[in-house]
Image (cartoon, grey):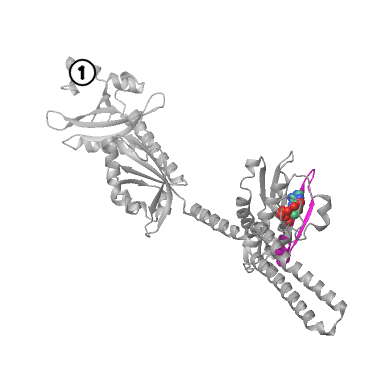
Amino acid sequence: MRGSALSGFDGSLEDEILKTVETPIVVLDRNGAVVRFNEASERLTGFAATEILDRKIWEFLILDEEIEAVRTIFEETCGASTPTHFVNYWKTKKGERRLIEWSNQRLNDEEGEVAYILATGIDITESKSREVALSESKAFLRSIIDASPVAVITIDDKGNILTFSHEAEKTFGYEEAELLGSNINALMPEPDRSAHDGYIRGYLETGEHRIIGKARAVKAQRKSGEIFPAILHVTEFADGSRVFVGFVEDVSSQAAIESRLKETQVQLQHAGRVGEMGEMATSIAHELNQPLTASASLAGAAALTLKKVDFSGRDGVIALLDDAVGEIRRASDIIRQMRDFVRKRKTAKSLHDINKVVEEACAIAVIGAEAEGISVKTDFQANAGAAQLDRTQIQQVVTNLVRNAIDAMHNSPKKELTISTERRNGLIEVKVADTGFGIPKELKSRLFEAFVTSKEDGLGVGLSISKSIIDAHRGDLLVADNKPSGCVFIFRLPPEAHDDAEQNP
Ligand code: ADP
């Protein structure tokens, strides 16, 4: 049967060819039954030609779910004058799958009727799985890029955008589709916008780079036109062609924090008038000394004059007393000036989150503490809350307490500064604790009075001003021993009424 049916396929040359080719070749009759199954097919499937001859191909080699499609293409090939192409799996004897790409050719008998179908295949199992792996790894890479918390943008060597991550969309306000293929310079303001193509060209020509591999502060521009500060990091890789990957971090909110810190610093410097008062107090003492001494001697002279009680001397006494009154007024003017100086700012209360206020003050007050070997800890409880307060004044209090604590640990063996906030018994509580030697005994009872100090260069007004600030906020300032050493200054403030309900149900 084989000989007669396979005219053109029974010669020894054809047999040799079928034997030696590495690709599977199968000949089916008009009903789909196997009439030739070459060696490569045997190796691939594990079936010997003898086992399967005369069996229809879809009865043993085709996956159930593909039988329908294979029969359809078989019929199509029977009716076609040109080859048909198809890709389907072969199920091996062991049950494994091989993916084969087929080219099917109809062979005619002498009457021109279809006699056989010659199917020549290429096993593409491995290359397909590589292709799938590649597209999976591309998808994987894309998902990493899209999960990145910074904007990731890739461009080609002409500056054209290839990918634009989710975060990039959020940062710049463009959709990826709007920008693909556009020049990256749309995302930067002048002068970089016009110069950017030149930067890339320069790099490609000379290999000299100004930015690759380094983080750099740049200005970027959103779709809205808003220009914002960003940190840009660029890396390059060659994926057949050159691709540059830019990581762009929007630091505008960080920049805002920094400028707020600066502003706070300026305000604290203003509040730092308390420090300037050291110098001022010396001159005030000197200034006050004169009118007070003068008025004392004037009053003394008036008394002496009165003792002699010479009626005719009355005008002289009055003149002396007038002078004394004048000097006393001068003294009180000086005191008033001093008070005005300290109270330069009127109390300006508004609602503030205590943690923010304390944190900002600490950021500046602890400068230099580490250089003194002090370890600084903070513990700001999220439930501490908000209060109506004068931010600068409260920060002045925190600064005073922190500076005192740092001073107190100058010579102490253990140097730990802890600043904390919490809500306790319905009040906002701020604590500044140190591990110094504690409050000198002799000062304890007068600690919050003005001009009480144990420091050589101290003025002794920090705590008294702090106390008056806290009093003005309807709070209280107190001190306690810290365990095992040092002391804790605590101030408590009434929280904002409506946040009371929220935080203390
Ligand atoms: P000054 O710091 O100019 O002396 P203060 O009113 O701020 O003025 O402080 C008064 C005094 O209280 C200090 O001189 C010091 O003796 C004492 N004192 C304040 N804070 C502490 C502290 N954390 N530990 C020990 N003593 C302190």
Q: How many marks?
A: 1
Instruction: Answer with the quarter of the image where residue 333 lies.
Output: bottom right
Image spot of residue 252 (x, y percent): 46, 54
Q: Is residue 420 visible?
A: no
Q: Quadrant of the C terminus?
A: bottom right
Q: Is residue 400 magenta?
A: no
Q: Residue at x 84, y 74 (%)?
A: 304
Image spot of residue 42 (x, y percent): 32, 20
The segment highlighted magenta reads 466-490
Image spot of residue 68 (x, y percent): 33, 38
Q: Is residue 339 above or below residue 34?
A: below
Circle 1: residue type? Ile
Q: Residue at x 31, y 20 (%)?
A: 49
Q: Quadrant of the N terminus?
A: top left
Left/right of residue 188 with respect to residue 420 in the rendered view: left
Q: Which residue is tagged 1?
A: 17
How many other residues sit within 10 Å of disc 1, few (<14), some (14-19) or many (≥20)? few
Q: 341 or 321: nearer the eye?
A: 321
Q: 306 or 9: nearer the eye?
A: 306
Image spot of residue 318 (x, y percent): 78, 81
Q: Residue furthest bottom?
A: 312
Q: Is residue 186 above or below residue 309?
A: above
Q: Residue at x 61, y 47 (%)?
A: 367
